[in-house]
């Protein structure tokens, strides 16, 4: 409690803000969100809280950004990368991963109310698809009480010849089972999901549509790629589809013929081969999940950029109240560097 009080005092006195202005003047901070939902939204009950931010807390974060940063669109980051523009001090870029429909329903109106740009990374084959990724479907079904851990384990055991019982329970046990499903061959993974189809059924719409993508783009939220399938790119057997195919598909969904120039790596995974292939495919900015503040002199010296994830646990207290001092300490003290 004493430490929490000290953090509040440092923020209230403006000392953290002074530290930030001095330390991070020549940095580009990229923040990463996933889902943004209001508790009154029917999708809230089944959403994974590790990747979901309450809409009012998201609004609090935006007010914090406006107070402490100069918020820029990705087009300015690209122009700086090309040597055509210099980013302002303490630049910040707001990004979203995956392509959730709730980003349109809840995040977009709040961005608009503050007059802020954003960048959404979209899984190409998730556009116009109602169902989310299988990981989220499993968590969703468990949270809604439709799927037990024992039932999930039984379905996995039928397809995993090396299956061993797990000791973990609750949501940790669910995540362990999901990681096992991720390691299965594609056909066996699909067999698990087929066996659980009744439990995983959800009539709600989770993923963004083509119409919503065009709305985002028209309202100042630029569109980047997050792969074709959301599978980790280093494991892909067809990087051409994941990289080039995703650019073409998203350009078609947007209807303007302009393929995305920004890519975020699904699951945060990449290697030198993936980076080389992404650059050859036409991407100019590559966003990682490494929590690094991008150190600048006049422009980004590398296409690889770090991002800091923003979760509810990191910015709220035990009563679910927004704590700006927690967000300040999470962002202001991140390591600074140049990824390469």
Image: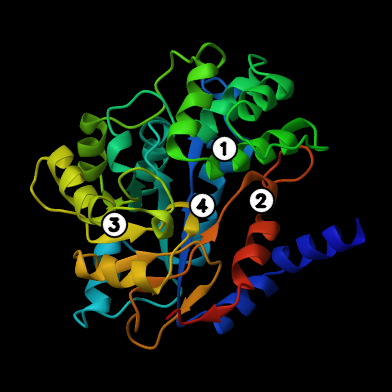
Label 4: which secondary element? helix
Please give the residue where the numbered disc 4 appears in the rendered image.
63
Please give the residue where the numbered disc 1 appears in the rendered image.
181
- The label shown at residue 315 is 2
Measured along the vertical axis of the image, is residue 167 above or below residue 281?
Answer: above
Label 1: which secondary element? helix
**Number of the front mark, 4 or 3:** 3
Residue 205 in percent (x, y) is at 39, 21
**Number of the front mark, 3 or 2:** 3
Tag 4 and tag 3, C-beta contact below 8 Å: no
Kindly report the distance in space between the C-alpha atoms of the residues bearing marks 4 and 2. 13 Å
Please give the residue where the numbered disc 3 appears in the rendered image.
239
Residue 115 shows in the view: yes
**168, 256: nearer the viewer:** 168
Residue at 42% in and 55% down: 235
Kindly report the distance in space between the C-alpha atoms of the residues bearing marks 4 and 3. 39 Å
**Numbered label tally:** 4
């Amino acid at each position: 409690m004493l430490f929490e009080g000290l953090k509040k005092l440092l923020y209230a006195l403006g000392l953290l803000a002074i530290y930030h202005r001095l330390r991070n003047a020549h940095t580009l901070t990229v923040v990463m969100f996933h889902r943004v939902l209001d508790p009154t939204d029917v999708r809230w009950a089944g959403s994974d809280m590790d990747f979901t931010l309450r809409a009012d807390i998201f609004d609090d974060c935006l007010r914090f950004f406006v107070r402490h940063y100069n918020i820029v669109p990705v087009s300015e980051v690209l122009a700086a990368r090309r040597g055509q523009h210099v980013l302002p001090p303490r630049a910040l870029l707001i990004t979203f991963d995956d392509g959730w429909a709730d980003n349109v329903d809840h995040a977009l109106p709040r961005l608009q109310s503050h007059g802020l740009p954003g960048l959404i990374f979209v899984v190409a084959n998730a556009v116009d698809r109602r169902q989310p990724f299988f990981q989220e479907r499993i968590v969703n079904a468990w949270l809604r009480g439709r799927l037990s851990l024992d039932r999930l384990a039984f379905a996995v055991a039928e397809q995993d010849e090396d299956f061993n019982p797990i000791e973990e329970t609750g949501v940790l046990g669910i995540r362990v089972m999901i990681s096992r499903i991720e390691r299965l061959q594609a056909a066996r993974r699909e067999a698990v999901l087929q066996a659980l189809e009744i439990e995983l059924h959800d009539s709600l719409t989770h993923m963004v549509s083509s119409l919503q993508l065009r709305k985002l783009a028209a309202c100042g939220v630029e569109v980047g790629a997050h792969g074709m399938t959301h599978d980790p790119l280093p494991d892909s057997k067809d990087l051409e589809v994941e990289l080039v195919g995703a650019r073409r598909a998203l350009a078609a969904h947007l209807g303007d013929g302009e393929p995305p120039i920004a890519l975020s790596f699904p699951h945060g995974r990449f290697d030198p081969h993936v980076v080389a292939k992404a650059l050859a495919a036409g991407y100019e900015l590559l966003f990682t999940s490494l929590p690094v503040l991008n150190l600048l002199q006049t422009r980004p010296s590398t296409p690889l950029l770090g991002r800091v994830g923003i979760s509810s646990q990191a910015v709220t207290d035990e009563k679910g109240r927004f704590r700006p001092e927690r967000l300040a300490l999470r962002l202001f003290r991140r390591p600074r560097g140049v990824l390469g």
